[in-house]
Amino acid sequence: MNMSNLGFLSPEGKCYSFDHRANGYSRGEGVGVVIIKPLSDAIRDGNCIRAVIRATGSNQDGRTPGITQPSGSAQEQLIRNTYRKANLNMAATRYFEAHGTGTPVGDPIEAKAIANAFKDPHREPLYVGAVKSNVGHLEGASGIAGLIKTVLVLERGVIPANIWFERVNPKIDAKAWNLVFPTETIPWPSTGLRRASVNSFGFGGTNAHAVLDDAYHYLASRGLDGRHCTKYQRSGLSNGQLQPGIDVNVRPEEEITRILALSAFDEAGINRLTSTLLGSQMARGNDMSLEDVAYTVNEKRTKLSWRSFAIATSQKPFFELMFSDPVRATNENRLCLVFTGQGAQWRHMGEGLLRFGVFNKAIDDAQNFISSLGCYWSIKGKRQYESTFWEFTDL
């Protein structure tokens, strides 16, 4: 009641972010979680990198005419300082996730601060969005909601529309300030690196800012090899519809095959897991990568006593997977994969297995052992002598 009496809350229960009808914000409920770790650690641990945080910063408004009136100059200074301390090019930023509560006072101040910070007569328009129009003001969780939305924008290469938007607030000169408040979903407006900013403010005058780059272009520009799920748009819009994103990790025509291994405490648990997996978003035609599913299921789950598996291919509908009958694993009967190494089907047939760390290490261990016995040739082989592991094992 107190917040309504002070004019904070919208009587219509909606956040009309940057719209001429802005009359306060709607309250929302939610929680968001992100896992942050150094990029080198994420690459080392094989984590899926959703985006790269290039810089963060915070400051305080100081004294303003009232607690409900933020400082535009403090917001502008924070944006500039955040980019400056990381030596980042502001012209590369094409999307800005604003605080955008939908208040008649705060929205114009923030829009003006954004325009001043990115002011450049030669720059391309800056697209501005606000997730509060979708989910309301989550207050303590509002910043993380904006961050998560921005990560998805960078991954998908898609800028969603601002809902409830009719006309820009008359105090915001969007054309002169080179700002665009999209009213329809659009593909990322440029090629190459995708960079975005995220704003978040506190009721007491604290401001926070973060700058994010998409994972794919950041890694590629530095010659780094890491897991990610960044998409690109093959053809943008067609007949007003956004075309599906393509995973930059896998060529559309490339077929991949992966084993999906499940385990549970009890036999019935296997059936519960398969039902859950086959009823997932991926099974319903979502573009989730098979690589990601296989990696999570196989590498990030505890191996329990009851086991089942299925062989999945990227070209086969996921819901058609057939999992094996559950079996109980015991300490006495352990699964062992045996490869003869003699190239019975084709020359170098096992060489590709060297890309798997456990196989490569086993070969290195064997090499160290036979070298200690006086062996003068290499198991892996040295091509300059036209000798390979597979030929030596024939001997």
Image (cartoon, rainbow, N blue to C red):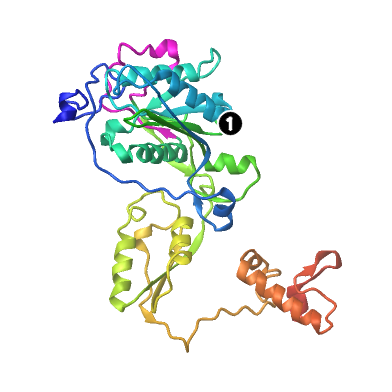
Check the picture and name the quadrant holding the C terminus.
bottom right
Q: Is residue 171 magenta?
A: yes
Q: Residue at x 44, y 22 (%)?
A: 74
Q: Amino acid at mark 1?
A: Lys
To which quarter of the image does residue 84 belong?
top right
For label 1, the crowd category at 10 Å Cα-Cα, with few meaning under 14, some 14 to 19 and many 20 or more, is few
Q: Is residue 303 magenta?
A: no
Q: How many marks?
A: 1
Q: Residue at x 54, y 15 (%)?
A: 120
Give the vertical position of 29 relative to 184 (above or below): below
Q: Residue at x 59, y 51 (%)?
A: 40
- Which residue is situated farthest in the front direction here? 63
Give the vertical position of 85 relative to 49 (above or below): above
Residue 12 seen from this side: no
Left or right of 363 on screen, residue 335: left
Residue 43 seen from this side: yes
Q: Which residues are magenta?
A: 158-183
- Residue at the spot of label 1: 85
Q: Position of residue 247 (x, y in %)?
A: 49, 46
Give the vertical position of 145 relative to 188 (above or below): below
Q: Main secondary structure of the magenta part?
A: loop
Report helix, strand or loop for mark 1: helix
Q: Position of residue 7 (x, y in %)?
A: 19, 23
To which quarter of the image does residue 173 belong?
top left
Left or right of 177 on screen, residue 5: left
Left or right of 250 on screen, residue 33: left
To which quarter of the image does residue 325 belong?
bottom left
Check the picture and name the quadrant holding the N terminus.
top left
